[in-house]
Amino acid sequence: MSLFQSEEMTLCQLFLQSEAAYHCVSELGELGLAQFRDLNPDVNAFQRKFVNEVRRCDEMERKLRYLEKEIKKDGIPMLDLGENPDAPLPREMIDLEATFEKLENELREVNQNAEALKKNYLDLTELRHILRKTQVFFDEREGDDGQSQAPAEIRTIQEATFSAPIAPGMNAPPQLGFVAGVILRERLPAFERLLWRTCRGLVYLRQAEIETPLEDPSSGDQVYKSVFVIFFQGDQLKTRVKKICEGFRATLYPCPETPAERREMSIGVMTRIEDLNTVLSQTQDHRHRVLVSAAKQIKNWFIKARKIKAIYHTLNLFNLDVTEKCLISECWIPVADIENIQMAMRRGTERTGSTVPPILNRMQTTQDPPTYHRLNKFTRGFQNLVDAYGIASYREVNPAPYTIITFPFLFAIMFGDAGHALLMLLFGAWMVIKESSLLKMKSKNEIWNIFFGGRYIILLMGIFSFYTGLIYNDVFSKSINIFGSYWYVNRTQAYLQEPDVKEVMLDPKTSFYDYPYPVGLDPVWQVATNKIAYLNGYKMKISIIHGVVHMIFGVVLSLWNHVYFRRPINIFCEFIPQLIFMLFLFLYLCILVFHKWIYYGARMVEGRYNEHCAPSILITFINMVLFKGADKTEPPCNNYMFTGQEILQKFLVLAALLCVPWMLFIKPFILRSQHNKKMLLEGKVHQTGGDDLESGETNGIATEDTNASTAPVPATNGGQTAAPSSAGGGAHGGGHGHGEEEFEFSEIFIHQAIHTIEYVLGSVSHTASYLRLWALSLAHAQLSEVLWSMVLRIGLAQKAWWGGILLWAIFGAWAVLTVSILVLMEGLSAFLHTLRLHWVEFQSKFYTGQGYQFTPFSFKDMLAAADGLDAAD
């Protein structure tokens, strides 16, 4: 029942013993049926009682996020067994903190050691490459076997340094100095240019690439580097070269002068690398074991830490009594769940062994309660469509259960193609069938989550659209011929002259067997040249009929609100004239449509007229509103569709016009009369000695049932008065919490005038708005037909041997365009238009949407929000 009308709520005051408060709140969090109010709105968040516990929980979450990041870095799967552990006891919080602290410190120490070992490993690896790749450079400098000459560049440096040429056979000057190191490969060109310019060409650079990438110990990235050796002469150039290497972040390594020393160092480096490999492997194994052990529990640890934090955050909303032995809170709870909440608090008290029972006290208040509907995974999607317009006011009628049927049906009228609907149906059915496995994926993709959250809406839209597609006999713009055709083509002389004609003009007088097709549209209309003209009239009238019925149903639902909130004035001054106005004008228009379908046919038979006598319903309706008689017709046709139509139409229009002043004037004057009587009554009470009564009590009694009708509240689209809860809907449904408002007749009259004008003009515009059902249905069918004839038909028309290959490619293009344009884009367009018809044309007749959502303290909702999921899923 709460789906049709929100749950009755009550404001309760809870008295909890300090020792048992934690456990009671934990039980209420598991139950998820209490919305706590903040009793300390002026207290800073850092000055509340349990702020230190909240900080400790924040620190635990930080450590868990660090562990989670390290686990994900190693690609270790985190097991999610679907468990929901209870909130730990307060004393268990210390054990959790110690466990997290130990794990974090151990992991950080392991990471630091591993980083240091990797840094040493990188240094030794780079030194090994230097010793291996620079040997040829030193051989060139010294000359092979001492016989060959040094390279020309080195001789140039020596000559430039000693300002004299070195003749062959002369004693060579002292050996050149050198530095060796490793630099990032992408920095090498700039490094070489700067060396040349800064040292004026008096250096000799040799470099060789390291083929395999090296791992950066700090970031873990794979980088490519090069080995280099720089030869120079003199200490001044040596200092300059080292500064340049430092600027380019090149790593310099000591390299021995003699080959024997280099070989000896190389052997030592290889030995140390092997030892480091062993230590690194053991370190990584230890790290992996720690992370695997943590991965098994981290999901449960997160749940426990978040539950503890949520409990203490909720306890910060409570007040302490004067003895500081009891915590006091206020919360909104459903009246139907009071017993469950009391049992939950008793369980929490029993867990602590306390003998003092918790106390739940219902409070009287004039504040508007929150709106709460009990939903499941099927109804939540439709309720979200309604809530997107506005949260229902407390205890007013909820459009969601009716939207479950009307929304996919109106969508299907616009999306009436059985082929496209089948694709949508299969997609929705797949999401529903695979619901459990898809939920476990916990995708963070927003678009996918929107589709998955509306899986039942998509499923119903597909089912309804498949039905309307069969009624339209439209499958990928083609018809299905199941029962044959109930039309025949009279091949006249024109057809005999063109025997290959493929399209015909269907005339009911000469081509119809006068038997209706069993289901839907006759397939012969697919080749008829007057197909669009026929479908235009058919779909246009169907759209108006559905729209009028939809709006009348919305007006009828407003009666529910008026009766429940005890607003007899609104029933007499709003509901009755609104219903009369809608029935006498627009329902009569629909009756004319059915009358024309029944009594006017193509052939002249007894009791029926042929098509020449059929009047235009649009012209008839316009003449009716303008009090203009029907156009003259020749016998055997009549001027009117039935006897007494002229008198009936004048009566209906006059009655509808009388509804306008009925809605405009009567209610404001009745409210003024009630206000004057109340003022007179209060004056008599004071004159008879009632001055000692508290005015607040008198006002509270007098205004309980009149606030809704006397307060000048703003109008909505449908004119529904705001704050329906102010009319006494339940124990806590009265008033706005502001006492009695001053009566202003002018404001009430202006409000009623706006409400009346909006309803009268809106009835006309809303009726015309339903023509979008016809327009989008026709556009979808024509676009589908164009896509078939201009794309797929090209491949089907090929008769050569390569036609199959061409058809394969064209079918792929046609399928992509069908899914992307006709299913996704056209589906989204029809969805938005259907949403507008419900928000504006339907809900404006009875729905205010001025409430606020019931957001209970719930561990389930809290954990789902932390994971970025919908709690209903």
Image: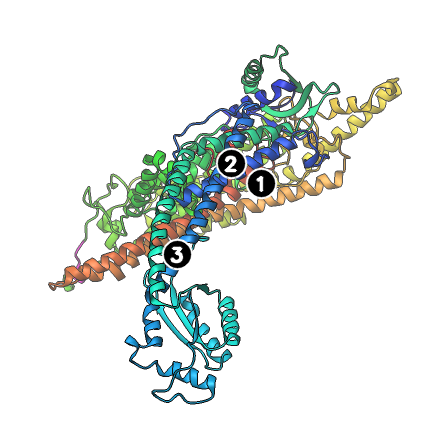
Q: Is residue 492 magenta?
A: yes
* Residue under numbered circle 2: 554
Amino acid marked by disc 2: Gly
Q: CA distance from mark 3 to mark 2?
A: 81 Å
- Residue 407 percent coordinates (x, y): 43, 40
- Residue 305 visible here: yes
* Residue under numbered circle 1: 718
Q: Quadrant of residue 670?
A: top right
Part of the protein shown in magenta = 490-495
The answer to whether residue 657 is above or below residue 366 is: below
SS for callout 2 = helix
The answer to whether residue 751 is above or below residue 121 is: above
SS for callout 3 = helix
* Residue under numbered circle 3: 124
Q: Quadrant of residue 428?
A: top left
Amino acid marked by disc 3: Leu
Mark 1 vs mark 3: in front: 3
As drawn, the label of residue 696 is: none
- The C terminus sits in image quarter: top left
Q: Is 238 in front, or is 73?
A: 238
Tags 3 and 2 touching, CB below 8 Å: no
- Residue 483 percent coordinates (x, y): 19, 41
Q: Earlier in the sequence, mark 3 or mark 2?
A: 3
- Quick check: 634 left or right of 496? right
Mark 3 vs mark 2: in front: 3
